[in-house]
Structure formats: C-alpha cells, structure tokens
Amino acid sequence: MTIVQTRPSLIERWREHLPFAEGDPIVTLLEGATALVPAPVISEMVGAEVYLKCEGGNPTASFKDRGMTCAVSAAVREGAKAVICASTGNTAASAAAYAARAGITCAVIVPEGRVAMGKLAQTLIHGARVVSIAGNFDRGLALVRELVERHPISLVNSVNEFRLEGQKTGAFELVEDMAGGPDLLCIPVGNAGNITAYWRGFCEMGVAPRLFGFQAEGAAPLVLGHPVEHPETIASAIRIGNPARGKEALAATAESGGSIRTVSDEEILAAYRLMASKEGMFCEPASSACVAGLLKYGADGASTVVCVMTGRGLKDPETAIERNDGAVISCAPDMGAIEEAVLGDA
Ligand code: F0G
C-alpha cells in the first residue's frame, strides 16, 4: 500500500533546528503550519496591525501538538512504552492522541472537576488513563515528577526539553510568514513553557520582538513574584500557581524588553466574547487572556502585533454556553411563532 503524505510533519519541516536525525522514528499527526489571521477589529481598537496565530488549527486543537510530536517521538526513540503528564487539559489531550498514534500507553493527572469538557472527552476517547486528584495542577506536576523517578515512564510536560524544542517552531513560522516576525508578541502564560519556547525560537532566528505575557489575576505567580497556593480563574488552562518554567519565562521577557502582567477574569471574558462576535474567532478563555492584555495595556508603540490563540473554543463548551449574552430561543413549529422568534425584539 502506498501512503501519501500531503505535507511535511513539523519535525521534517524544521529538522535542521530540531534534535532529530534522518531515520529517527517520527510520531506525527501533521501538526504546525497554522494560520496567521488578521484581526481588523482588534487592530482598529489598539491602533496597530494585529494578527492571530491560530494554534487551535493543530490536530488536537491546541499548540501542545508542536511540543508533543517531539516529546513522544523522542520517547519512542528511547524505547519508552508509556508517557505521563499533569495537565489542565490540553497537554493531556495532546499526549493521549500522540501516544495512541505511537501505540504506547498514556496516563494523565488532572485536577478533579476542573478540566474543560472538550479536553476530557479527547483524552478519554484516545484511550489514556485519566486520574483526577483533589488538588491543583501544581500538585499534579509535583506528583508526576516524583513518579517518573520511580518508574520507567516518560514525562511529557513542558519540563521535558523536547516539548520546548517543538513549540519554538511557532516562532519560526511567524518569522517566515511576516518576513522577520512581529514587533510584539502577546501570549497567555500558565506553566510558562510556551513563552519560553517562543523566545528560544525567535533567538534562533535572530529576531527579537518584545514579549508581553499575560496571567489571570487569580493565578499570577510571575507577576506577584511568589507561588500562588490556590490559583483561581475562569481560564482553567492557565489556573497554575507555581510555573515550572517561570524563571526562564521572566528572563526571556526581560531580555525582550517586555513584561508579564495580569488581566482579570472579566477582561478575559470580554475579550473572549469580542473575539467570537466581532472577529469570528472562537478561542478558549486562556487564549483570549492575551487579547485582553493587549486591549488593557495597548500595543505600546508596536506597529505589528501577534496574539497567540493557544487553543480552540470548542475545548470549553461550558464556558461558551454559560458566559455568553445570547440564549437559545425556544419556539413552536409554526410560521407565526417563527416570525416572532426570528424577527421580534428578543
Ligand atoms: N493556553 C492554553 C489553551 C493552554 O492549555 C495553556 C497551558 C496555556 C495557554 C499556557 O501555556 O503552560 O506553556 O504557559 N496548558 C497546560 C496544560 C498547562 O496542561 O494543558 P504554558
């Protein structure tokens, strides 16, 4: 049988910049090469050219797939039979999908009752063992770090170098698509792997946009300067109180001449609704945190700005349904009622 591959995998595309040799096993779902979409409404509001890097276009609908193709390929190369991660949901979904693809097992540790429904559905259908703890992401990460010391299981959180190596390709694509990259990158910050990876990618390409990272007010350890024991925010993906890559993220941000700042849940939700209703872009709340930050603090003189839309809105249907201004209008199946429902002032 001939299997035709329509485009290169992320590892093939960027092999010269990644720690994979010809002939190494590659576990791929053809991730990366995501769209860069202009945002005319946000552009008008901030007085700069704003673009959205649509990472929800990845196979499992978040940026995690860039790192996961590398982490799982490396695990397979090392002979691993199992991978594990702690997760607020997206890493879990991605690890589960790539492990399924590789034919190895996957376990994920998640905070009980605090993972968005789409992410949980993905993780389960891919066949991962989902373990929920009465504790937050930070506790889960501490536990899996200890577990992999005792058992031959490969850890695929962003403490794994291969994750950052894969995720830096997001920056490569921006440099390619924008002929040198943007002046300013706005990005949500949770465990702080992605902002660290983007900076690495920009540095390797010899460009240096300013980085504006955004944390939710109730989960802002990097802004406060100390861990947050009970992180809280509507943006469940970035509900993290003790980021593993925090130091590197702060160093990268400072080196870029940027900063990490906070946005409130109200600001996150306002940006979330604005993106969906005015730009036609349904992202998850954590992703909209970076748009909220751009709207709150401004483009600060930048003429081109990229907001990293880290995950697709369908990941979190509960928030979309509960936190939106509209509602389903129930109607009798006849013309008079339909006319009233469609045309009347709702
Ligand atoms: N946006 C989304 C949609 C995420 O899922 C995450 C992290 C981030 C932003 C923040 O990225 O951690 O590299 O700073 N999600 C992780 C997870 C923690 O388990 O899925 P970061």
Image (tube, helix red, strand yellow):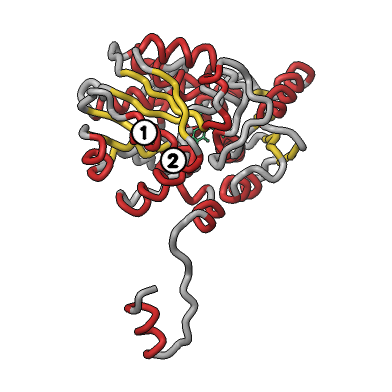
Disc 1 marks which residue?
A: 296
Tell whether 86 sits left or right of 94.
right
Q: Distance between the residues labelled 2 and 1?
A: 8 Å
Q: What residue type is labelled 2?
A: Glu
Q: Position of residue 187 (x, y in %)?
A: 41, 29
At a point 30% along the width and 18% down the height, the residue shown is 209
Observer-nearest residue: 80 or 131? 131
Q: Is mark 2 on a helix, strand or loop?
A: helix
223, above or below 126, in the image: above
Q: Position of residue 190 (x, y in %)?
A: 54, 28
Residue 58 in sight from this viewpoint: no
Tell whether 210 sits left or right of 233.
left
At a point 39% along the width and 37% down the height, the residue shown is 292
Q: In which quarter of the image is the C terminus?
A: bottom left
| Cβ at disc 2 under 8 Å from ligand 1 | no
Q: Is mark 1 on a helix, strand or loop?
A: helix
Q: Earlier in the sequence, mark 2 or mark 1?
A: 2
269, above or below 106, in the image: below
- The answer to whether marks 2 and 1 mark residues whose Cβ atoms lie closer than 8 Å is yes
At a point 44% along the width and 63% down the height, the residue shown is 326
User: Residue lying furthest right in this view?
Assistant: 150
Q: In which quarter of the image is the N terminus?
A: top left
Q: Categorize mark 2 by other alpha carbons within 10 Å: few (<14), some (14-19), many (20+).
A: some
Q: Where is residue 83 in the image (x, y as percent from the top left)?
A: 66, 29
Q: Where is residue 177 in the image (x, y as percent from the top left)?
A: 24, 29
218, above or below 337, in the image: above
Disc 2 marks which residue?
A: 267
